[in-house]
Image (cartoon, helix red, strand yellow):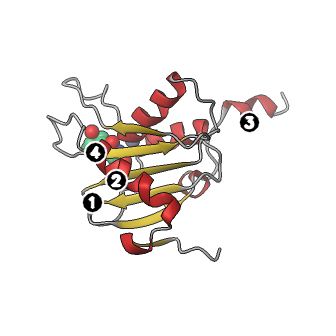
Amino acid sequence: MNQPQAGHKDNLPAEWRALAEAALVARKRAYVPYSNFQVGAALLDEQGAIHFGCNVENGAYSPTNCAERTALHRAIADGHRPRSFRALAVTGETHLPITPCGVCRQVIAELCSPDMPIIMTNTKGDWRITTITELLPGAFSLEDERNQTQS
Ligand SMILES: O=c1ccn([C@H]2C[C@H](O)[C@@H](CO)O2)c(=O)[nH]1
Ligand SMILES: [Zn+2]
């Protein structure tokens, strides 16, 4: 790859800068009375529109929805097809760029193409670009299961 894979906001490729900024806007909408840890996500669709996501917590804890899943599920509900997305940005107040949790990785593996850029950032503007193939190698998928020969 000749593109940089990590850096600070000044050298974030221009095509992803607006998406990272949208994730910062989404982050301010987080509903986090339990963790007080705000996360924002922004998903770019194939028409170039941005879908916002924030974490939404719950008093029973397990219903909590991460920012990444909020953005992805909203876009699917709005009629966008799985694996049609161009990029996903995520941001939080972390030392290093925030990385999606295990549950979100499984959902990203289902709904995004294996090579879709995932732009991980933090509120200081550090960033790293990765893919779900790198974050969740060997992901379980029902598609693969169905393709296995029966024994
Ligand atoms: O990538 C991440 C990591 C964590 N969270 C949320 C879940 C919970 O509300 C809070 C603390 O884990 O942050 C996200 O939304 N995305
Ligand atoms: Zn998550």
Give the residue type that dot 1 points to: Thr
Q: Nearer the viewer, residue 60 or 118?
A: 118
Is there a contact, CB below 8 Å, between mark 2 and mark 4?
Answer: yes
Q: Is residue 99 visible?
A: no
Judge depth for marks 3 and 2 and give the one in front: 2
* Quadrant in which ligand 1 is drawn: top left
Question: From the viewer's perspective, is residue 131 above or below residue 70?
Answer: below
**CA separation, marks 4 and 1?**
10 Å
Q: Looking at the image, tell me whether mark 4 or mark 1 is earlier in sequence order.
A: 4
Residue under label 1: 123
Q: Looking at the image, tell me whether mark 2 or mark 4 is earlier in sequence order.
A: 4
User: For this view, does 35 lie left or right of residue 55?
Assistant: left
Instruction: Give coordinates of residue 129: x percent, y percent.
Output: 50, 63
Residue at disc 3, secondary structure:
helix
Quadrant for the N terminus in the image: bottom right
Give the residue type that dot 4 points to: Arg
Image point 23% across, 26% down: which residue? 58
Residue at disc 4, secondary structure:
helix
Instruction: Give coordinates of residue 9: x percent, y percent.
Output: 37, 69
**CA separation, marks 4 and 3?**
35 Å
Question: From the viewer's perspective, is residue 62 above or below residue 114?
Answer: above
User: For this view, does 57 lie left or right of residue 97?
Assistant: left
**CA separation, marks 2 and 1?**
7 Å
**CA separation, marks 3 and 1?**
37 Å
Image point 51% across, 40% down: which residue? 49
Q: Looking at the image, tell me whether mark 3 or mark 1 is earlier in sequence order.
A: 1
User: For this view, does 137 lie left or right of residue 74?
Assistant: right
Image point 83% across, 27% down: which residue? 150
The mark found on residue 91 in the picture is 2
Give the residue type that dot 3 points to: Asp
Q: Quadrant of residue 56?
A: top left
Judge depth for marks 3 and 1 and give the one in front: 1
